[in-house]
Image (tube, grey):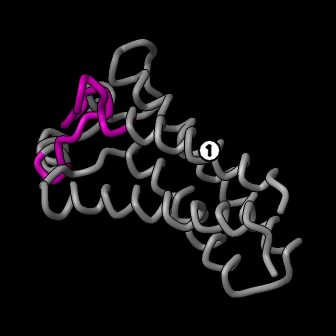
């Protein structure tokens, strides 16, 4: 029988990344908000966490399950930290490290090629939030939910019985 804490942690490790990825995809496909490069960076750890959480439901004993859930919690936290960085770029607390936070450098390209590149690229800036709720952008909400969620998972893993 699986301890209550591990059962709860496993469920949270599955639901948190599933909900955040579902929300991100809904904003993209239904809401028309095209993700920037840093938005994609935040999704990758959630995909990994989701895979680990699913494995925790279908494989191994309690120790293996707990290890998989802990790994999922760590990946969820990584996404949250990327969200903190992205939100900081959006609020202009610090400079972003991607080309989507500044004007693209077109030097060295022919005028025709530069124009083609500009017209082909979606205009989605990493330093300008497309949506916010209560003054918090999607990156900010991902940071809050991911970091709090990872903490809740860790707390449940430490529970006994």
Q: Quadrant of residue 103?
A: top left
Q: Position of residue 60 (x, y in %)?
A: 82, 84
Would you say the magenta stretch is mainly helix, strand or loop?
A: loop
- Does 99 appear above or below 19? above
Q: Which is more toward the observer, 1 or 48?
A: 1
Q: Position of residue 47 (x, y in %)?
A: 52, 65
The question of residue 59 being in magenta is answered with no
63 up-or-down from 119: above or below: below
- Quadrant location of the C terminus in the rendered image: bottom right
Identity of the residue drawn at 77% across and 55% down: 157
Q: Which residues are magenta?
A: 119-139
Q: Indicate whether 55 appears above or below 94.
A: below
Dot 1: element:
helix
Residue 32, x across and y down, in percent = 12, 55
Quadrant for the N terminus in the image: bottom right
- Residue 80 vs residue 140: left or right? right
Q: Indicate left or right for 133 with 4 as reference.
A: left
Q: Nearer the viewer, residue 8 or 74?
A: 8
Q: Look at mark 1 in the image and give the residue it sits on.
A: 77
Write the residue at 57% across / 36% down.
Answer: 81
| Label 1: few (<14), some (14–19) or many (≥20) C-alpha neighbours in 10 Å | many
């Amino acid at each position: 029988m699986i301890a209550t804490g591990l059962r709860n942690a496993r469920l949270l490790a599955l639901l948190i990344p599933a909900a955040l990825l579902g929300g991100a995809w809904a904003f993209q496909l239904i809401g028309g908000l095209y993700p920037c490069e840093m938005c994609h960076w935040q999704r990758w750890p959630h995909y990994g966490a989701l895979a680990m959480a699913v494995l925790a439901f279908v494989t191994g004993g309690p120790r293996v399950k707990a290890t998989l859930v802990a790994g999922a919690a760590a990946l969820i936290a990584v996404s949250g930290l990327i969200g903190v960085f992205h939100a900081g770029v959006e609020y202009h607390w610090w400079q972003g490290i991607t080309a989507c936070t500044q004007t693209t450098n077109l030097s060295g390209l022919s005028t025709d090629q530069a124009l083609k590149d500009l017209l082909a690229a979606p205009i989605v800036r990493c330093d300008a939030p497309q949506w916010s709720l209560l003054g918090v952008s999607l990156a900010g909400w991902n940071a809050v939910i991911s970091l709090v969620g990872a903490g809740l998972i860790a707390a449940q893993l430490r529970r006994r019985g």
